Amino acid sequence: MRNRRFHPTQRFITPSHIQRGVPLKTLMGPTLVRLIGQSLAEVVPRFDERRFRREASRDLDGLELKERAACIAQAMAAQMPTAFEDLAPLLIESLGPPLERTEGNGLAPFFYLPHTELIAVHGVSSFESGMAANYGVTKRFTAEFSIRPFLVRHRSKCLRVLRRWARDDDPHVRRLVSEGTRPRLPWARRLADFQADPNLALPLLELLKDDGEPYVRRSVANHLGDIAKDHPGLALDVCERWLREAKRSGDATAAANRRWIVRRALRHPAKKGKRPGDRDREAGSRVWPERRRGFPGSSANTPTRMIFSTPRPPGVAVFAGHSCGPPRENHLLESTPSCVTPGRSRIRCGGRGRGPRACRGSFEPADHGHR
């Protein structure tokens, strides 16, 4: 007998985290198909659950995660109205309760991965209804995948809506504003226009950089990290300005939060050094480390630090034992406190163990002082 006290989503029992040796695609199995069928049967007139289970489960064993979700989405659409303007209200009505927290939800929200596939394929032809469906789903899972076709096909209109959503009360909606516009979002198609021109999404990041939820700020940092991979000079300009503004504001909490964003956003350029003369330098990059094992006069235990220098004239960059150029005083980001090695710029070890590989480095404003 069906338990009507709880929505089918609340009966979708999953692990709290990804388990070793258990692929995520197993979530898109018979239990999920049965529960989605139940949720739709409650709102879609004459919905045939048996037919849905048969069509949604067909050949699932040979499919991967997103292919399984697409197969289930196709079976969902087969028994719903053809016009998305009519489909969307039924889909939204079939959804379970919104998430009440930003962490600790486990894998249960993957219940809605087929819903995002359905919206991405069928909803993009109807902007208003499709965005309403994205809004409903992202409160329960994430619409970062399903919103991308809207950004490609209806870019201007979609950006206007996202600007409004950046002030939404729900942190899941605010996170979507940043995460959905990431040019290099994992598991998703790249947004070529946003990758070529980061200024399309930067105004949205400006609205979210001081968000009260770490969940949202983490997305802002990841988005800025995507930008840093293609436009390192621009990303560092943004970081420098954000840190400078935070310092002027006198808000210690905001300053600490922005330093965290900068550290996370620049972690990939810090790990992957670029030699002077690369295309990154031509684009105005301020990150110029050389790939060398240590530097003259250093030993395995010499402490190291990471420095981003101003671009004109070229300054110094030291990445976990890799250095080039003369030291300068006007550094964008430095770690503190620091020590001094004769004949070299100020350096510090940010990690444990021996040798350059053990040093992780850290980012702080140059004039932050000792803690």
Image (spheres, rainbow, N blue to C red):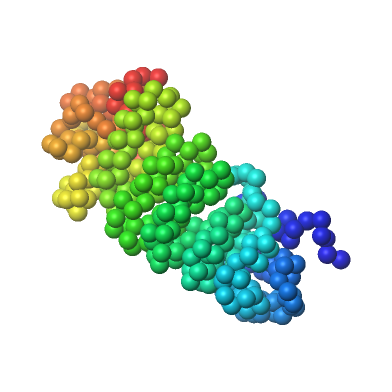
Relative height, residue 253 to residue 126 (above, below): above
Residue at the image point whose x is 52% and y is 43% from the top:
215
On the picture, is 141 further left or further right than 307?
A: right
Please indicate, yes or no, whether residue 82 appears anywhere in the rendered image.
yes
Please indicate, yes or no, whether residue 34 appears anywhere in the rendered image.
no
Please provide percent x and percent y for residue 299. 27, 32
On the picture, is 90 further left or further right than 211?
A: right
In front of the other: 92 or 181: 92
Residue at the image point whose x is 42% and y is 54% from the top:
160
Relative height, residue 286 to residue 25 (above, below): above
Please provide percent x and percent y for residue 124. 48, 68
In what quadrant of the picture does the N terminus appear?
bottom right
Quarter assignment of residue 51: bottom right
Please provide percent x and percent y for residue 112. 61, 61
In front of the other: 11 or 276: 11
In what quadrant of the picture does the C terminus appear?
top left
Please provide percent x and percent y for residue 168. 53, 45
Most distant residue in the right direction: 1
In front of the other: 352 or 103: 103
Quarter assignment of residue 257: top left
Quarter assignment of residue 73: bottom right
- How many numbered badges does the structure rendering display? 0
Residue at the image point whose x is 39% and y is 33% from the top:
259
On the picture, is 343 further left or further right than 117?
A: left
Residue at the image point whose x is 23% and y is 41% from the top:
286
